[in-house]
Image (cartoon, coloured by chain):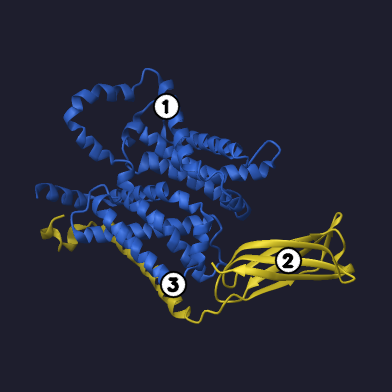
Chain colours: A yellow, B blue
Amino acid sequence: MSQADSHKPESRSVAEQVSFFLALAILLIIVSCVGYLWVSDRTQSPSILEISTHSAEQRRASYYVPFTVTNLGGTTATTVQVIAELRVDNEIVEWGEQTIDFLSRDEEAEGAFVFVRNPTDGELIVRVASYSEP
Amino acid sequence: MASSKRRKKQRHGSSLRGELNDLVRGLCGAFLFGIPLLYTMEVWWIGSSVSPPQLAGVLLTTLVGTYLLSRTGGFRKSQVTTEREAVEDAIEALALGIVCALTMLVIFRQITFETRLSETIGQIVFESVPFSFGVALANQFLRNANSSEKSDSSSANQSELSKMDRLFPEDNLNETISDIGATLLGALIVAFSIAPTDEVTVLVAAIDGPWLMLIIFVSLLLSYSIVFQANFTRQEQRRLQSGLFQKPISETVFSYLLSLAAAALMLSFFGKIDITASFDLAFEQILILGLPATVGGAAGRLAV
């Protein structure tokens, strides 16, 4: 590189200048978004994992209970463990477990537990048992 | 000084077509370098969970990296002659990397209208790192056609005979077999490490009809661009070759089908698909792994 050449803005063709300014605009948009997130991200709350279940649906010989887990907190949760227990007469007759790899802020994950017995015949408990910090 | 002036003249003279060729070369370099990390779920997740100061740090580091690479390699036909040009090329490399990352993450359905802004920006910034470095390294991957021509000028007479032999081969079959081998080898090198991973299965679940069509289109476009548009070495020679499949469009389509076959073999090697598997599922996996296989295959045909 030559020092003498370093102050010649006209060294670029129009096409090169256009693509440079487009590139600069793209970079500025990304930098602005990061700046906005930086300013708005200062009040981060820990993960709050809420779970909701839907009514059981019979498909052939099994009962499917769909569920949705939502991270209402401000930080990401990983390895979210969801467990379901079906109790009849206070005794666990069926149970299931699922792990959701990754749940960022406001993100939802859906799934379903499958039971042989009809969940409406007993008490169904679906809850989040644990999660890890990324 | 004289050579510096000549290089400057080349840059002055670069037309819109020249600029487009430079950008295409940068994009091809980006995909050659960035594809493996694109098929890594952890990068999507890391991008979704990091804090804004970390993102700013990643952007700055990438910019410094692309600046250093632009001084020696870069993606333009002519090398940079001033610091300012190196900085401008670095910014363009980063922007091209961002565009590549955004496009592919949208096609892979990792960024949708439902994705939050922080997650979107995080994924783009992290995935743009290998793409940006790939742009800035484009000239290093496969030597530029012109520079290789210049370096060979001293032995022009000697090479003339062999060049003519290649342009008008006695046995077209040899050219074709050589290209098939190079495509399979390139596909194997790039896609073999991706084939056994869960990412292919995860992407099958995420990507449906129209987006699969886009993957096919992107695969064909990249294959054509790398071999016939990016002005990498031997491009002109390839245009003149007369093997069975060595017209640009037919070669692109044929090598794509070959890359899909290579992807299918790799998936079956790792037990991801077999005869008993659902045809839809197997076909989608092949198309998704077909993208890195095609990029590798295209690079392989240029390298051999």
The reply to whether the C-beta atoms of the residues labelled 2 and 3 are less than 8 Å apart is no
Which label sits in the foreground, 1 or 2?
2
Q: Which residue is mark 2?
A: A83
Q: x%, y% of residue A67? A: 73, 67
Q: In the rendered view, does B6 fall on the left or right side of B107?
A: left
* Residue B100 shows up from this direction: yes
Question: In this view of the protein, can residue A19 be seen by the observer?
Answer: no
The amino acid sitting under disc 1 is: Ser
**Residue placed at 19% from the left, 53% from the top?**
B12
Name the residue beneath numbered marker 3: B52
Position of residue A53 in the picture relative to residue B25 (left or right): right
In this figure, which residue is indicated by the disc labeled 1? B178
From the viewer's perspective, tell me whether residue A22 is left or right of residue B289: left
At 76% from the left and 66% from the top, the residue drawn is A84
How many marks can you see? 3
Q: Secondary structure at mark 3?
A: helix
Chain of the residue that carries numbered disc 3 in the rendered image: B
